[in-house]
Amino acid sequence: MTKEILPTMQACSFALVILHTKELVQQELGDQNRDIHIPSEQLCQFLAAAESIVRDAGSLGKHSIASGVKKRKRLKTPPEEIASDDEVRYVEQERKMARRIEA
């Protein structure tokens, strides 16, 4: 497996575990309105485990470019030009808003 695919696969695996866990919880609890009490120590352990998984998987938002690949420069976006039809529509929208404010 390439290094680029591995973090994605780990994230997908983690998402599947979460979905499976949610299904198990729904089966066990049944009633959606019941209170759940989890000690703060256990919540901290869960958080530490989740942070460890994310840290081990690497940054999911990190985009790396292979060596030797050149980035293409982005073309400049042309300035927006307002057509006469657009201007008529904007004037009509302004009139409607003015009528709403007056009412």
Image (spheres, rainbow, N blue to C red):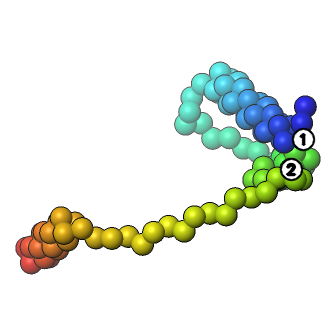
Is residue 25 visible in the rendered structure shown here? no
Q: Nearer the viewer, residue 8 or 79?
A: 79
The image quarter in which residue 91 lies: bottom left
Q: Mark 1 points at which residue?
A: 3
At 78% across and 53% down in the image, what residue appears? 63
Does residue 84 sit above or below 44 in this rendering? below
Characterize the local packing of mark 1: few (<14), some (14-19) or many (20 or more) Cα atoms within 10 angstroms: few
At 55% across and 36% down in the image, what residue appears? 33
Does residue 63 sit above or below 78 in this rendering? above
At 60% across and 25% down in the image, what residue appears? 30
Number of the label disc, if any, that sits on residue 65: none
Toward the top, the furthest residue is 27
At 72% across and 44% down in the image, what residue appears? 37
Q: Where is residue 61 in the image (x, y as percent from the top left)?
A: 75, 53
Q: Position of residue 4 (x, y in %)?
A: 84, 42
What distance separates the C-alpha of mark 2 from that of mark 1?
11 Å
Q: Position of residue 45 (x, y in %)?
A: 88, 48
Q: Name the residue under label 2.
A: 66
Q: Report the amino acid beneath label 1.
A: Lys
Which sits earlier in the primary sequence, circle 2 or circle 1?
A: 1
Q: Is mark 1 on a helix, strand or loop?
A: loop
Q: What element carries label 2?
A: loop
Q: Report the amino acid beneath label 2.
A: Ala
Q: Which of 19 and 34 is in front in this view?
A: 19
Is residue 20 visible in the rendered structure shown here? yes
Q: Nearer the viewer, residue 98 or 28?
A: 98
User: Marks 1 and 2: in contact by CB < 8 Å?
Assistant: no
Could you tell me which quadrant the N terminus lies in?
A: top right
Position of 50 compared to 23: left or right?
right
